[in-house]
Amino acid sequence: MAKEINVLFLDDEENILFAADRLLMAEAYGIKTTTDPDQAMVLIGEHPIKVVVSDQRMPKIAGIEFLRKVKAAYPDKVRILLSGYVDFVTAEEAINLGEVFRFITKPWKTPFLKASLTHAIEQYDMVQANRLLFEASERKNKELEALNNKLRLMFEAQKGFTSTVSHELRTPLASIKMAVDMVLAGTTGEINANQKKFLSKAKDNVDRLNRLINDILDLSKLETGRMPLKLMTGDLHEVIREVIEMQAAIAVEKGIFLNLEPAADLPMAAFDKDRLIQVLSNLIANALKFTDKGGVTVATAFMPEHNEVRVAVRDTGLGIQQADFPKLFQKFQQLGDAGERRAGGTGLGLAICLEIVTRHGGRIWVESTYGEGSCFYFTLPIQGKMEGCS
Ligand SMILES: Nc1ncnc2c1ncn2[C@@H]1O[C@H](COP(=O)(O)OP(=O)(O)OP(=O)(O)O)[C@@H](O)[C@H]1O
Ligand SMILES: [Mg+2]
């Protein structure tokens, strides 16, 4: 197979070119020689030349001038200047200016000439490989940038979509609720027991839909950072008591207990009260929903090793199988059969709790023995750690 022509020699002396040709015959690369600078430029364009070697003293053009022209037309070609010792200053300057890669004095030492050419070819290949790598990484960067932009646009669109849809649903739902409430209250005239039964069902479903829309809206706001925390340092027990009071009637109706076991000397924690109420309400509502005998205990504790307070919502209810633990905090995840679902939830409560607790810099998790009860824990840092708060 013919060798690839990678080296070009330009010299006005035929015997030098002849010597170079013979000397490099056995090398892996092929060489072309010429005495004419114009012809040399043509050859560079025609062959995959990597290295251009030029004599300095020629009648038509000085070697350094010629190599400058090569550099201007083909910046990647590696240039070598060939000359006698008398031109050393010119050569030194050219090397320092980056115009030539090496200076080889005539008469050359054969091993030095060969090593210089091999080195020059390696240099050329390395620059090309780097260029390819650079171009590939540029391309990847551009692709990533485009993908990022697309994701950002999708994210923006989804953000707007969720809140627009939720708001659009809220208005008609409010008027349906008002109408149903009025008819149920007898404002529009007497209704019979059957009508009352159906309307009550409609009212329950309207309430459920309202809760779902609020949950979706909350989650979307939390996930997109549009719900900054309004942090305050406060007494956790006070907030827990407030939520227990709100749900006490459900416990009474089910004939189960709902207690607070407060830790003595619990340090103050920093929290957004409204968001904390949301977390506690859902955990307590869940515990009550899935417990038919025994009851629910909310217990607090100080965890000095992590500098945080821990809240536990413990129940003696259904329990959760360990295999289901990872599913719990995902959106729209409800375990078990439709019977449980009929309990009225949407499966967003724990996903919202996870977002809120995480935004506070805390953790949330569950421990449970199936058939015996569950305990949901969450922590709140006593100081520092919170993110995205106002
Ligand atoms: N204390 C608990 N005991 C047993 N199962 C529970 C308990 N808490 C949660 N779960 C299970 O986890 C599921 C998800 O709870 P989550 O609070 O996210 O949704 P939900 O209560 O069904 O609906 P939502 O809270 O949105 O009204 C529940 O449907 C239930 O299957
Ligand atoms: Mg719930």
Image (tube, helix red, strand yellow):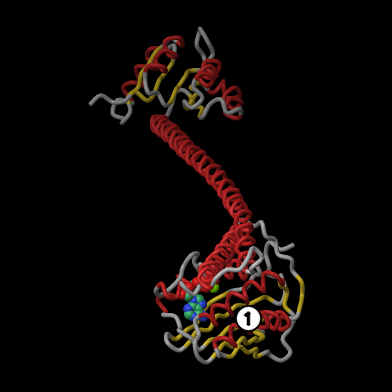
Q: Based on the displayed image, in which of its 4 quarters is residue 388 positioned?
A: bottom right
**Furthest residue to the right?**
233
Q: Quadrant of the N terminus?
A: top left
Q: Is residue 160 above or below residue 319?
A: above
Percent x, y for residue 138?
50, 38
Give 145 or 19, whichever is nearer the viewer.
145
Residue name at image x 52 percent, y 71 percent = 197
Q: Based on the displayed image, in which of its 4 quarters is residue 85 positioned?
A: top right
**Furthest residue to the front?**
190
Q: Is residue 348 visible?
A: no
- Lateral position of residue 74 relative to residue 232, left or right: left
Give 200 or 40, whichever is nearer the viewer.
200
Percent x, y for residue 116?
43, 32
Q: Based on the displayed image, in which of its 4 quarters is residue 89 positioned?
A: top right
Q: Is residue 330 visible?
A: yes
Percent x, y for residue 241?
70, 83
The residue singled out by tag 1 in the image is: 247
